[in-house]
Amino acid sequence: MKYLFSILIFSSLLIASPMNARAQAKITHIAVYVEDITRSTAFYTSVFGFPKLDEPFKDGLHDWLDIGNNLSMHIIQAPWEPVTINKHNHICFSVPDMDAFIENLKKLNIPFEDWPGNPNTITTRPDGIRQIYIRDPDGYWLEVNDEF
């Protein structure tokens, strides 16, 4: 019985061993294709306060921003070709104070809307999270919520 118990313990340790765990993929950055890197970098740094990171390419066509949680945004300027933009395809950022964020949008003269598209309106989800939608300089939709 003691031998069987030892085998069961050893087997369970092997099964739970990190060596047998599959590595999980994780997101490291979001790449955003833009027409004017200066305009887009100014937008994301002034609206969200994202600090710039060291840019490894040093070619004037890339900027890297720290967007929190060990993630970065890679802003890439390339010859512009119109893209299909839809509100269903968006990036979401959470902020600790929605009211202060909206005040900053107003100071920067950046319009916002709720999900259906009503200007200056906040959507409150069934779980109580408040959300708004804005567009960046290239027209990409950004959800901003207070799930922070």
Image (cartoon, rainbow, N blue to C red):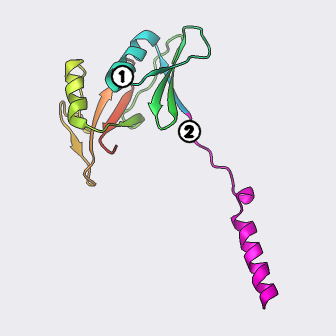
Q: Which residues are magenta?
A: 1-28
127 or 104, nearer to the observer? 104
- The residue located at (56%, 16%) in the rendering is 55
Q: Three-letter amino acid code at disc 1?
A: Asp
Estimate the x, y position of residue 128 in percent, counting from the top left: 25, 51
Q: Is residue 40 above or below residue 22?
A: above
The location of residue 8, given as percent across then percent down, is 75, 79
Asked if residue 36 can be seen in this view, the reply is no
First in sequence: mark 2 vs mark 1: 2
Q: Is residue 106 left or right of residue 25?
A: left
Indicate whether residue 15 is drawn in magenta. Answer: yes
Classified by dominant secondary structure, the portion drawn in magenta counts as helix
- Mark 1: few/some/many CA within 10 Å (<14, 14-19, 20+): some
State the residue at coordinates (17%, 31%).
120
**Residue 27 numbered tag:** 2
In the rendered image, the vertical position of residue 107 relative to residue 85, given as above or below: above
Q: Position of residue 79 (x, y in %)?
A: 53, 10
| Left or right: 51 as drawn, with respect to 116 | right
Residue under label 1, please give it.
136
C-alpha span from label 2 to label 1:
22 Å
